Structures are given as structure tokens and as C-alpha cells.
Image (cartoon, helix red, strand yellow):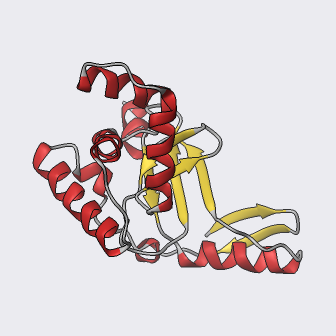
Amino acid sequence: MRHAATSAGILNIELSDDESMRKPNLATLARRPSEISKALLAAQRVCTDGARRLTPIRRDVYALLLKERRPMSAYELLSALEKTLRRKLAPLTVYRALDFLIEAGLAHRLERSHAFVACQHPSDEHESLYLVCSACGLAEEVESAKVADVLTAVSRKHGFRPEQQIVEVRGVCADCTRVATK
């Protein structure tokens, strides 16, 4: 059983291992060029279905987010993009691409770290729950309908109307825990 702290006290939330509905993690899979290509094709479909245009710069920013398993700041993306394209870009170019990717459901902004990650389930409507490793920086997106339901219920109880739910849980991932205990 996991507990969630709220202003109303501690809420008990029972999560089974299968309840987190783990789906193929695009960001993890996308480390190989062939997987990045598959994810980019899926992103193109998401954009086409939503009558959006995935321009070359938007595509490049998304590809960089897919390649990394950790959140990246806009300036890290800008630097990597400039190296890849071998030309200078205005920061606004990256911010506009990120705004588009977020609007299209292809990326999320992690508020605490002011960084961005590729959405690992872009074709599914969902609330974001991220497990962020404080040791290696890995950000894994997981889904939990129960957590989303609890947050909605708490919001309603307080007369609050949420516009977006992005939950960030900081801690140490399984790989880093294993390395630390050796």
C-alpha cells in the first residue's frame, strides 16, 4: 500500500503491480535509431490525426527527447539541436517546438525541474505520473487511474477544478538502488 499526502491528511491508495498499466515505454525503447524512427512515425500519425503539422524542427526536438531517458531543459535541447544541425538557433525556436509537442500530447513539462520529457503514451489520453531518479536522472512515466481518481476527488472536495495533473515522484530507481547496495 502506498500513501499520498494531501492537505486533508494521508490517503491510502492500494496499487497492485498490474494497476500501474505499464505499457511499452517509448522513451526507453527509443534509444536505438530504429525505435526512434518508429516513435517518430507514431508521432506523425498523432499530429496528422489532430490536424497538426510536425515540422522538421519539432521532429528534431521530439527525437532528442526520445533519445534521452532523462528530462532535458530547453537550453540543453537548444545546445544539442545546434550541434546536430551545425547552426545557431534562437531559444524561442525550441520553446515554440516544445509548446507544440506538449499541446499535441507528445511531451510533458516537469514543473519541479523545469525540464521536458517525451510522452511515453502519446496516443492515449492520460494523466502523467513520473518517477524521477535523483541519482541518474531517469524519468519513467507510469499510469495509475487510482492516483488520478484520488487527485480528482481531493480537488473536488476543496472546490478546485484541475486543468492538468502531472505528478512527479522523486526517489532512486531500481538500477541505482542495485548499484548502491553492491
- Count of numbered badges drawn on the protein: 0
Figure quadrant of the C terminus = top left
Position of 73 compared to 24: left or right? right
Q: Position of residue 120 (x, y in %)?
A: 37, 59
Give the vertical position of 168 relative to 165 (above or below): above
Position of 109 compared to 50: left or right? right
Give the vertical position of 112 relative to 25 (above or below): above
Q: Position of residue 111 (x, y in %)?
A: 64, 45
Residue 72 appears in view? no
Give the vertical position of 101 relative to 20 (above or below): above
Give the vertical position of 80 relative to 130 (above or below): above
Position of 2 compared to 33: left or right? right
Q: Position of residue 73 (x, y in %)?
A: 50, 33
Q: Quadrant of residue 121?
A: bottom left
Residue 80 appears in view? yes
Frontmost residue, 119 versus 98: 98
Q: Residue at x 51, y 33 (%)?
A: 92
Figure quadrant of the N terminus = bottom right
Q: Residue at x 43, y 54 (%)?
A: 101
Q: Residue at x 81, y 63 (%)?
A: 6
Q: Residue at x 28, y 50 (%)?
A: 28
Frontmost residue, 83 versus 52: 52
Frontmost residue, 115 versus 140: 115
